[in-house]
Structure formats: C-alpha cells, structure tokens
Amino acid sequence: MTALNEMKCEACQADAPKVTEAELAELIRMIPDWGVEVRDGIMQLERVYKFKNFKLAIAFTNQLAELAEAEFHHPGILTEWGKVTVTWWSHSIKGLHKNDFIMAAKTDQLLEN
Ligand SMILES: C[C@H](O)[C@H](O)[C@H]1CNC2=NC(N)=NC(=O)C2=N1
C-alpha cells in the first residue's frame, strides 16, 4: 500500500465524504504523533512541533506554507517561540478527509529533510 506521505491530495469538494469511524481508526494509526481534536463540532488533526528557538519555528512554518500551496490544502498554524502547532481539517466538508491525513504525514516528512 502507498505510504500516506507519497499520496497526493484530491481537490476539496463540498460533497466529498468525511472519513468514516473505521477509516479514522486505520488512518490515525499511520500518523501516531497526531491527535484528534473536535472544535465547534469540527474534527481536526493536531500536532505540536518543538524547536530550539523562534527562527527555526518560522523556518518550519515557511516550509509548511510551501507544502500547503503545492497541494492546495492548507492547515491552521500557530507559530510561537520554539513551538509550532499544526492543525489539519477540510474546510469544505467541515471535518476530516483523507487529504488531511496525507498532509499530516507530509508535514512530518518536512522534519526528515
Ligand atoms: C476555496 C477553498 O478554500 C479552496 O478550494 C481550498 C483551499 N485550501 C483548503 N484547505 C483546507 N484545509 N480545506 C479546504 O477545504 C481547502 N479548500
């Protein structure tokens, strides 16, 4: 099976299906460092990345911005001194799509470069 971080996002359609509970259970195991949050009824994937300082946090943020533009799928990002909180969900369906798991895996891959 293709690894999540090798997959490409599909275009965000308003009628795209949210992941089922079974798909969620399978996909979340592939991104073990990510948690599931629910905010205003919207399920989201979230991970906090730690860095030595603000400059490294900003550099990671900029890399993530490039990735989001390349896939045209965009995260929530909170960049602080030594910390970047990344949140993925699909605005168009107000919930989680497989795209969000792909992007979480690709986000982790940024640290490997
Ligand atoms: C108009 C709409 O915002 C765009 O089609 C894209 C942009 N990036 C996106 N990013 C995310 N996370 N979800 C979306 O639904 C989404 N839609």
Image: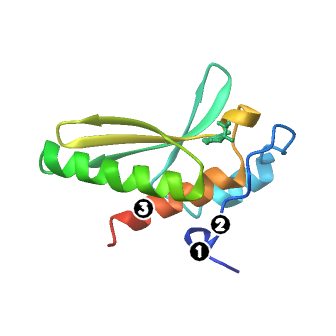
Query: How far separated are the C-alphas under marks 1 and 2?
Result: 7 Å
Q: Secondary structure at mark 3?
A: helix
Residue 45: which quarter of the image? Answer: top right
In this rendering, position of residue 6 left or right of residue 62: right
Q: Is mark 2 within 8 Å of ligand 1?
A: no
The quadrant of the picture occupied by the C terminus is: bottom left
Which residue is the site of mark 3? 108
Residue located 50% across and 52% down the image: 68
Mark 1: few, some, or many residues within 10 Å (few <14, many ≥20)? few
Residue located 79% across and 53% down the image: 22
| Residue 77: numbered disc | none
Considering only order in the chain, which callout, 3 or 2, is on the residue closer to the N terminus? 2
The quadrant of the picture occupied by the N terminus is: bottom right
Instruction: Please state the total of marks drawn on the protein image.
Output: 3
Q: Secondary structure at mark 2?
A: loop
The kind of residue on which mark 1 rests is: Glu
Residue located 68% across and 22% down the image: 41
Considering only order in the chain, which callout, 3 or 1, is on the residue closer to the N terminus? 1
Could you tell me residue 30's position as x and y percent?
A: 58, 64
The kind of residue on which mark 2 rests is: Lys
